[in-house]
Image (spheres, grey):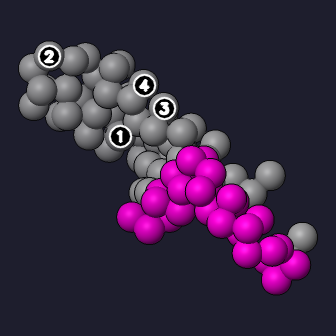
Amino acid sequence: MDANDLSEEDLERLLDNPEVQKTLKYGEVGLEEVAELLEDFESDDEESDTFDLFTQGVADRSGRVTQATVQKVISGMIEEVNDVTSND
C-alpha cells in the first residue's frame, strides 16, 4: 500500500499506533545500526575474544551482574530492535 492512498484519518491512526511510534523512535536514535553492529560483534568468530573481554569488562564495572547476564542483555537488545524494525 502506498502512503498517498491513505486518508488523513488513516494516516493519523497509523501514526498514533504505539508500535509504529516505537519503530520511528528506534530509527531516530540509530538503535537499528547499534543492534546491527553488536550482532556482528557478537557473532564474528574473529571478534569472539574481544566480545568476551567487552562483556566481562561491563560485568566487572557493574559489580552486580555476571558476564552471562551482560551477554543475555545484549542479545535481548538485538532481538528487540530487530523485532520492532523488521520490515516483515
Distance, label 2 to label 3, CA atoms, is 19 Å
Which stretch appears magenta?
3-30
Q: Which of marks 4 and 1 is nearer the N terminus?
A: 1
Between tags 3 and 1, which lies in front? 3
Q: Is residue 16 covered in magenta? A: yes
Between the C-alphas of marks 4 and 1, the distance is: 13 Å
Instruction: Give me the disc on residue 81.
Output: none
User: With 86 as the anchor, is 40 left or right in this view?
Assistant: left
Q: Which residue is located at x 32 percent, y 27 percent?
A: 70
Say whether disc 3 or disc 1 marks the residue closer to the N-terminus. 1
Badge 2 local density, few (<14 within 10 Å), some, or many (20+)?
few
Q: Which residue lies furthest to the bottom in this view?
A: 4
**Crowding at mark 3 (Cα within 10 Å: few <14, some 14-19, many 20+):** few
User: Could you tell me if the residues under marks 2 and 3 are in contact, i.e. CB atoms within 8 Å?
Assistant: no
Looking at the rendered image, the disc whose residue lies closer to the viewer, 4 or 1, is 4
Q: Within the image, what quadrant is residue 30 found in?
A: bottom left
Q: Which of marks 2 and 1 is nearer the N terminus?
A: 1
Q: Residue 64 carries which label?
A: 2
**Which disc number belongs to residue 76?**
3
